[in-house]
Each structure stands twice: as structure tokens, then as C-alpha cells.
Image (cartoon, rainbow, N blue to C red):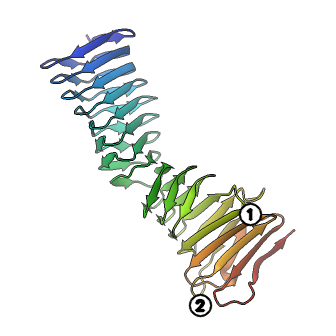
Amino acid sequence: MSTIVSSGHHLTLTKGKVGKDIELKGGQLIVSSGGTAIGTVILTGQELVSRGGKSSQSQISGGTQIVYSGGVASGAIVSVRGTETVSSGGTSLATTIKNGGTEIVDAKGTASGTIVSNGGVLVDHAGAVVSGLSVLKGGTVDLAGGTFNGTVAAGGIEAVTAGTITGQTIGAGVSLVVSAGATAKSTTLGTNATETVEIGGTVAGTTKMGAKSTLDIMVATNSTSLTVSGFGGNTIELAGFTNSQPSFQYVPSVGGPPGGTLTITAASRTASIQLFGQYVAAGFHVTGVQQNIYVTYTSPSAHAPPDIAGGHH
């Protein structure tokens, strides 16, 4: 029969003590130096793993596990509003996050071998050490200023909510979401990958677009500027540019000088897309355009830009 720790109570595992299948219902389990917890069930309440303490196989669904400096947690399963927080100096090994669970890795915290499956989120703060990460379809790694080593499968999500990521390669079928205040610089989009830049987010450097990839910019200012390479057989969208959402595609054509600029105007708003590659005006196609939007392509050698989409009135 398992031990139940209810609200307002706590249990401490000290040196040499092993607690198995302890159930937390609002109470606290403190795993101190030399103590070991195995199979803790955290419905509500907290499991606190301090220096020298070890926890393994915890099931966290609604409560919280906090791994402090010198503490180690391994094999935890986090789901249904449960949270595992790895503080500075703490270590998490082989955690599985799913179905509404969250793992938060603070600066100088370490998470190794985490698996993030459908509905799970790993929050990676600046200075965190996240290695061996595997994000599966429907899982999310939230780069809150941090970086990671690992893989994101098709259908997985990389969210940038703080700081700048530079030179990130977004794998085939993966979505990158850049939130307000964050920046994605010089990203590379794989086949069928999507980069969505939300209002207040920034895209910088040159975005390299793979086949059938999509760059979706949510426009909130009167002046937008992008630099893109590899544009052809993929899509650039300007969400919120006007009441419509113009999309731009290019069917590769032979010839044309390298570079050029695609300019989109509507009332007081202008978007300028600097292109790297060889283009001719006839290759561009515009969809989703409704009223009073004008699109032109300027060749590097052109004296007067041709209107490729015409004026939509």
C-alpha cells in the first residue's frame, strides 16, 4: 500500500532512505542528500529533489517536480498540466513529456535525452544545457533564449519566445514560430517546413527556403523588409498586410540576372523582399490579393520595374 502525502503535510527522505510509489495529493516530498524516491505519483503538490538526492520514474500529472542544484531526476513522465523544473545545477535524464506536460530547464540546468511527444512542451531558457532532445510530431521545444542539441521530427514545433536564434535549420515538415520580441536570423527551411513570424517578431539575415516551404510574416507595421534565397516552388505570405493575405510564389524559369526586389504596396504599407537567385518577372504568381494591392518585381538591371500582378482595385 502506497504512502499518501496530503495537503499541508510533507515527507522527507534522508540519507539511506528509499521511498517507493509515494502519492502526493497536495503535500510535499523532499528528497535530500542520500535519499531516493522511486515511482512517485504527483497528482498535486511537489517533489523537491535537492543536492545529493535522486528521483526516478516519477509520474507527474498536475503537480510539480523541482530538481535543485546537485539533484538528479531520471525517467520521469510529465503529462496533464504537470511540470518538471530543472533549476541551475540540477539534472534531468530521459524525461518524457506528453499530453499537456511541461519541462522547464533554467539557466545552467541540464536536460539530457528528453522526449517531447504530442501535446508536450520543453521550455529552454538561455544558458540551459539541453542535449539528446527528441521532439516528435505534435511536440514543442520553446526556445526562450536557449539552444539545444537534438532532433525535431516532421509535425514538431520550434517556438522562439525570447532572444535570437541564428543559423537554425528547420527540418522537413517542421514549424518554426517566432513570437513577439524574439528574432530568427539566417534560418534554413527544409522541404515542407514553415516559418511563422508573429506580430512583434523579427526575421533577420537571409532566410533560405527549401522546396514547398512557407515563410509567413504577420505584418503590423507600415514597412516590412525581408531577404530571401532559394525562392522558387515555395510560398511567402504576408498575413495582415491588408484585409487580405497576399501570397507570393515563383515558378522557376531559365535565365534572368541574379537578385532583384519584390515590392508590395497597399495604401500606406510597403513590403520589400530582397531576392537572391535568378528570376524573371513572368515567373512570379500572386494569390490571395483582393483590393488596392500592387506588386512589382525589379530586376537588378531594370530601369523601370515591371508590374507583375497589376493593380487590384
Residue at label 1? 288
User: Residue 242, position in %: x, y?
Assistant: 77, 58
Instruction: Judge from the rendering whether residue 127 lies leftward or rightward of residue 304; answer left or right.
Output: left
Q: Nearer the viewer, residue 111 or 268?
A: 268
Q: Check the image and report above or below for 263 versus 19.
A: below
Of the 4 image quadrants, the one containing the N terminus is top left
Is the residue marked by circle 1 packed among few (<14), some (14-19), or many (20+) residues within 10 Å? Answer: few
Residue at label 2? 255
Examine the image and state in which quarter residue 261 appears.
bottom right
Q: Nearer the viewer, residue 68 or 214?
A: 68
The answer to which of marks 2 and 1 sits earlier in the sequence is 2
User: Residue 178, position in %: x, y?
Assistant: 54, 53
Q: Which residue is farthest left?
A: 16
Q: Nearer the viewer, residue 59 or 179?
A: 179
Q: Check the image and report above or below for 202 versus 274.
A: above
Examine the image and state in which quarter residue 256 appears.
bottom right
Report the Cα–Cα distance between label 2 and label 1: 27 Å
Indicate the secondary structure of the residue bearing disc 2. loop
Instruction: Judge from the rendering whether residue 156 lies leftward or rightward of residue 68; answer left or right.
Output: right
Q: What residue type is labelled 1?
A: Gly
Q: Residue at x 65, y 90 (%)?
A: 301
Instruction: Judge from the rendering whether residue 310 lies leftward or rightward of residue 91; answer left or right.
Output: right
Indicate the secondary structure of the residue bearing disc 1. loop
Examine the image and state in which quarter residue 251 appears.
bottom right
Q: Which amino acid does label 2 sit on?
A: Gly
Is the residue marked by circle 2 packed among few (<14), some (14-19), or many (20+) residues within 10 Å? Answer: few
